[in-house]
Amino acid sequence: MKRLSLYIKLFISLSMTLSLVTVSFGSGAAQPYLDENRVAYIETVLQAFRQTKLQHIMNTYRYINAVERNNCRSALSDLKVECLLSFAKKNCSATRSARSSDHCELYSDIVIVNKLSENVFINRSERYRVTRNSSGDVRAALTNRLQQKYGKLVTQFSLTPWSDCEKDDLPCLATGLDQFCLDYTNSKSLSWQYCMSASLWFIGTSK
Amino acid sequence: MRTRLEKDIIGHGEYFDDAARLHFGANSISLFLIMFISVVIAFNLDYLNGSYLKGLDTELSFFIGLFSVLFGISFYHYWRLGEKSVYYLSVSTTPYTPKDTIILFNYKGYAVGVGYQANVDILELPGLVRKLICVGILFNVALVTLDNSGFEKLRTLPSEFAPSTSDFCPEEDDSADSEIIPEGCELIIRAHKLGYAKDLGVCEPKKIDPEKMQVCQKRRSDEPYLHYMSRLLVNSVEEQQAFFDNNKLKTIKDKFRLQLSNLDTLRDYQTYAISAAPRASHHVWTDLPYPDHYIIQKYREYLDPNYCIERFQKKQTNTITLETGDERNNSKLLEHVYGQLLFNPKSKLTVGLCKEYKIHWNSEPDICERLASNPKSVLQQARVLPEVERVLHRHDTANALLSLEESIRDIENVNEKSEEKKQDAPDNVAGLASGETNLISKGQIDVKSKIAKGKQQIRKKNELVSFQCFMTANTMTANTPTQKSNVSNFKFRDTEFTVTTRYFPLLENNGESQISMYNQFSKVLEDRFHYSQLTSRSDVIIEGVSSEAADNEKFLQAPSYLFTRLDILRNVDIFLGNNWVLERDDLLVVYPYHVHLQNYVNKFREKYQERHGRL
């Protein structure tokens, strides 16, 4: 009798643990933008930037720029997003190892969002001004201007208490960046993912 | 053995068996004190700071040095500071105090006093030291009173008094037949001259019309002062003569009489302008509790009148985070929505000033019914009657002022016409007169149309003052109709007002309740406002191409490319009822509110300002 009750208890506790695990994993999969999932994703992006050569990142950057200007030109933003995603996936699947493919997907995500947010960071009148004032390569002038804007954003972040992290403490940096961008998007007119991507790009490519 | 100092003292003073008396000269003491005070002042004002001294202009440094040496030595000689002092300050042991000394106080057997012309040896600073102190005092004075910008002004002062070229008439060569070449057109003009361009386009030089030129009344460059003075005198006399001969005096008299008869209007206008009286008064009553504690709310109301500017125009966030279980959540939400819809400066349209709006919290559910039946008593009870009456009166004043302006214009025109008739009759120059009359009548029409436009621009009274009620749906009583809103009309101070009561449901879900609050509250402020796919900022939906809500939801569940996927939310407007987003707490955190919120607010304000505003 005692043994039976022990089995029953064991069964109940096991089934409860299993259901809890399922629920937590299930919710993680269904809700990838929950706080912990977001922070974990930001951390992996930071790691991907650290572990990838700058040359590979820049190659992807150039590839996505070219795709955006040619194959994925569309007035409908949803179509453009889907198109860029499919090209980025194709590009990353061509890499040699699974690890570098994962990394490629992570920094490609940042490159695509930065591409989509260009018009938000540099509006039409500013774009015109930069173009008019540049004597040489217009594209390079615009990239420099964008880099300045990203730098300004990261400077603002570094002035907040959220940036108070050790050099290699990526979870702390990821949490700080997430909080900073949540606060920034709530008080200013910039989407969370635009703020995140700009900051991650600036931090990740400053090697 | 005596020390050097004791020997010095003995040398100058008198020494009797360990009892001393010392006499310090008043000149030395005064100089020392003045020097001390000047150093303290200069030090406190940061003029003795090394970096400040280094930053001084070289010319100013030279000037300060020269000034302090010259005036310091002059000061030394003029006040005879090199001579022996007439007065002295005596410090002595009590029995040995000189007879002529006035004792100021005694301390531990020592007497401190002031003496005059006594035959005693007086301790004075050496002459060179006194001179140096005088120079030092003047140095401090110069340092405190002059800085680089002040010295620069002092240096350029003589040139400011000198007559400038603008005081003279320009030379003939500068004005007559000259052409103004637009900036940056030199190349095009040159190309045109060489035959490369047929037309100058915008670079066509603007020729000066000689008819429009006026005779220069300023002094000629070679004109003697006396001639210029006589010319000014003659002109002035002629002007005065013309003033009294013509109808101008009558015009002034008539205008003054008219203004005198409308003194109240003019006074009220000035009073309103100076006292920054409200230009509108909009009120919303709600049965929701105060969003903050009652005492805090009242403190802000009476002691911090600019709080609303700080709250709604400077620190407004896109969303509001509500704590679960807080009974004031709905009030906080309402306050947030109210601030976004009416005052958030991010929107391109400004519809009102927050000080002229008021939410009456914790009101009774039937307040608007009572307002419609007895407006004066309800407004008095809410302590807004004087404000509402002031706005209505200000509206009357604005209208009266425009009418007064019109009457003044009429007087001026009538007198000008009679003046013209007087002038035209003897000369009989019909052609010229008719031409001038045409010009004047055109000017009169312009002024009249401006006044008419001004009258049109003044909003109606019921656009400046408005009353609404925003009540929770559970307060709907048996007497209240079952529909969402109830409209009633009433007359107050000869103006028809419409008061709308809207009943809104209380929702638990944070995201859903925010959107619901926007939709409900915008309806109570402006019932004609309707937000739809056509007014939304999201892309046009193309069947077969645009993704459905279910597709979007699935798209945002994938674990890769998290940031890129979020971009599709820019096309998902939650103000249009995309409930799948509102149900996902994770998406609401990163949702780009600002994109759709700004558009929503802009569309609302466009509609709202059609029937509401300020004077």
Image (cartoon, coloured by chain):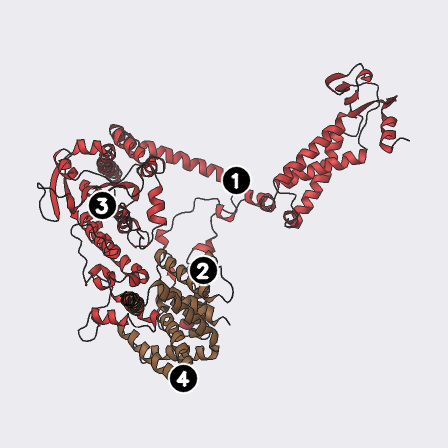
Residue, disc 4: A95
Q: Chain of mark 3?
A: B
Badge 3 amino acid: Gln
Chain A shown in which color? brown
Foreground mark, 3 or 4, reads 4
C-alpha separation, residue under disc 1 versus residue under disc 3: 53 Å
Mark 2 burial class by Cα count in 10 Å: few <14, some 14-19, many 20+: many
Chain letter for the red colouring in the rendering: B
Name above or below for residue A134 compared with residue B591.
Answer: below
Q: Nearer the viewer, mark 4 or mark 1?
A: 4
The tag on residue B457 is: 3
Q: Is residue B570 above or below residue A67?
A: above
- For the residue labelled by badge 1, is the local secondary structure a helix, a strand or a loop? helix
**Which quadrant of the structure image shows residue B536?**
bottom left
The amino acid type, in three-letter code, at marker 1 is: Tyr
Query: In the rendered structure, are the residues bearing label 1 and label 3 in contact, judged by CB atoms less than 8 Å apart?
Result: no
Above or below for B224 versus A25: above
Q: Chain of mark 4?
A: A
> Disc 1 designates what residue?
B225
Discs 4 and 1 carry the same chain letter: no
The percent position of residue B10, horizontal first and vertical second, equals: 87, 26
Left or right: B147, with B123 as reference point: left
Say which mark, if any, is on residue A157: 2
Q: Is residue A141 visible?
A: no
Position in image of residue B575 (x %, y %)? 22, 59
Q: Nearer the viewer, mark 4 or mark 2?
A: 4
